[in-house]
Image (spheres, coloured by chain):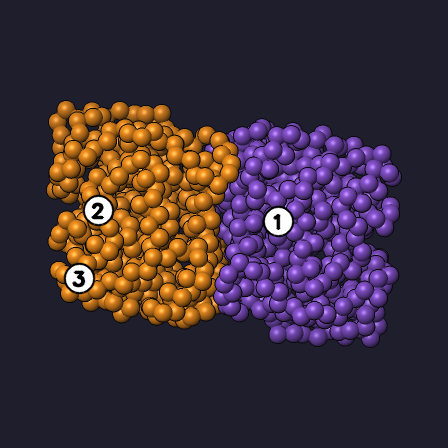
Chain colours: A purple, B orange
Amino acid sequence: MKILVLGGDGYLGWPTALHLSRLGHDVGIVDNFARRQYDHEMGVDSLVPIAPLHQRARRWQELSGQSLAIFPVDLTDAARVHAVVGEFEPETIVHFGEQRSAPYSMIDRSHAVYTQVNNVVGTLNLLYAIADVDPSIHLVKLGTMGEYGTPNIDIEEGFIEITHRGRTDVLPFPKQPGSFYHLSKVHDSHNIQFACRIWGLRSTDLNQGVVYGQETEETALHPDLATRFDYDAVFGTVLNRFAVQAVAGIPLTVYGEGGQTRGMLDIRDTLACIELAIDNPAERGEYRVFNQFTESFSVNQLAEMVAALRPGAEIVHLDPPRVESGSHYYRAAHTKLLDLGLVPHLLSDGLLESVMLVADKHRDRIDPGAMQPTVDWRRTSNTVGDARDPVAEPA
Amino acid sequence: MKILVLGGDGYLGWPTALHLSRLGHDVGIVDNFARRQYDHEMGVDSLVPIAPLHQRARRWQELSGQSLAIFPVDLTDAARVHAVVGEFEPETIVHFGEQRSAPYSMIDRSHAVYTQVNNVVGTLNLLYAIADVDPSIHLVKLGTMGEYGTPNIDIEEGFIEITHRGRTDVLPFPKQPGSFYHLSKVHDSHNIQFACRIWGLRSTDLNQGVVYGQETEETALHPDLATRFDYDAVFGTVLNRFAVQAVAGIPLTVYGEGGQTRGMLDIRDTLACIELAIDNPAERGEYRVFNQFTESFSVNQLAEMVAALRPGAEIVHLDPPRVESGSHYYRAAHTKLLDLGLVPHLLSDGLLESVMLVADKHRDRIDPGAMQPTVDWRRTSNTVGDARDPVAEPA
């Protein structure tokens, strides 16, 4: 099958591209390398060194015999998006091509606007290209569990049946996103659902939890195939940060109470879920939502699990930079991907040790300052002009 | 009170500015004159001639003794938005400053993108300016009843209490908007609610129905004070179009079955609702939603009411250009503004006659071609490049 992976140079896009290529699909990668630019802007770097995309692709061809088509395209460039979809003629498009950091979107006004325009316009351009070129293309879009926020009722998969004053309907699950980034994903979800309704497009919206881990079967084949490992306060995710802090012998930093509970999954399960979504596509006109995570943990639980593996590791609680509930009800459905056959890799001491092993291998690259939160949700600085101002001091 | 009216040169913004000025408020108008440009682009015009903003304001000063400050500012220009809010120091901002036509947003990709970027970025810039300059400013934002779509349950005012699997929460009412324009308003609503939550802003989101009528107590004082009367297929609203068709002796054009039911209100009630929202502001940190309409009618009912006043008037059903349900359940709460003291002007034969009188007075300006729908929701034309291409032929 011909598959385009948008954002195929990123943390999850790259391993996804490799995985689909190994399965025998004809894979094209679209990327504007924005993720690599954010590193320069913020003065941070992936803990694991990563090769440039062309080098990655050459190494993969050498090892697998499979080639990857590379399209250096910005999704906000409508003409080029249309051209790529028209030329490559994909049956499926996997869309990772968005700014994906909540703290980055909360740096200031210009980063908030950049995040929403980049994500919303990129996806609108894509929807129009699909509708115009071939409405039967299956769009597999990466959303986030963060779209839902933390309601005091069980979270369902995208939709909820509501009975109200004697009448019943199945309606989109109400969203309470917690950052301008998460809001951009909610905007996308509404736009995609509408496009499926009016144009008969088909889409699977994967509301993904927090991903941990760095190695997949394919990336482990050669150092040139490694994917990113982000541990900094802006792009890193919590479990990776704890692993690095434990390895570096510095305190694990929990934001606030630590009762914040989130759905999580192993990076290998991300690939498995995307494979399942592709192999079992949505119907024409259908917009469906899968909640893509395997287990829920509170931040405190994660910190304690990591600390338990490094006797003497300290856990500290920082003033919470985000505006979020430090303890709340959390129960979210996630059966649709299991029903399609997902067999999860659950979080184990073995997996945690393997993440810490990765961190330990690159301990000379650890920048402790990068893990201090610098973005405050309550800050309202109204940076004007076009420049996106860095907030982090050079390390 | 110092009040900024954004979009104060438009159909409702202008009469609102006059009304607030007559009540003794110190009113500033922000506008980028985009609405006047759309006329040039589409080759249409207000049926009632309207004076340029500076002329309108001079006439108002002459007649009332009250001056109106004019700020020719585009809301997507963050620096100027911040400057205006900082200089004028409003206590309340009434925000009409958005692209407000569903068909316009559905012309093609570039109009969809323009609508969402213009509306979402303008509102984001405003939220940052308020948060930075004075978080106690009350933002009265114009939303639309079209955000809700037509669910099979009663529509509540912004929020709904949901009991699910034994637990209960009050959550944002699920939205099913029917155009990229309506989607932009849903995006705004989510962004504003978030800003109230994290920064303690205060906002009233007025989910307004379809407005009819053209004269208010203030605009009737002089022809220079007249507001727009749009009857074309892109910017006109349904009742105005029917009135013009009846006056012109051409068939009233119902889209599809005509069972589409919408909340509606008199233009004078728009002013009264905004006055009530201003006089009874939201609390700090509060995001509240009022459904701003007074009666619901199906398109068929409206056509029949107008036709009954012009014996012999014909009603025709066109192929529906929109993707919407031609007959559906519709019941929406609208008690919050009544509770604050709204006394509605209900739709009467007298009001209908007065609208037809306006149309009749300017019958030499009627362009029958402008009332033919030219925008098809199902069209997916992917116009690329920066130009917004006109779809209407010159009349």
Expressed as whole percent of the image width and height from the top left, the position of residue B372 reads 30, 29
The residue indicated by pointer 1 is: A98
Q: Nearer the viewer, residue A142 or B387?
A: B387
Which dot marks residue B61? 3
Amino acid on which the number 3 mark rests in the picture? Gln
The mark lying in front, picked from 1 and 3, is 3
Give residue B339's position: percent from left, percent from top: 26, 60
Foreground residue, B35 or B197? B35
Q: Considering the image in quadrants, where does the C terminus of chain A appear?
A: bottom right
Taking the image as shown, residue A332 lies to the left or right of residue B45, namely: right
Image mark 2: chain: B
- State the residue at coordinates (15%, 54%): B217
Q: Earlier in the sequence, mark 3 or mark 2?
A: 2
Give the image quarter of residue B178.
top left
Left or right of B232? Residue B352 is left
Residue position for label 2: B50
Residue B202 in the figure: left or right of residue B249: right
* Residue shown at 45% from the left, 30% from the top: B378
| Residue shown at 65% from the left, 51% from the top | A34
The residue lying at 29 percent from left, 68 percent from top is B2
Residue A83, image quadrant: top right
The answer for how far apart the CA atoms under marks 1 and 3 are is: 50 Å
Instruction: Locate the N terminus of chain A and report the quarter of the image it occupies.
Output: top right
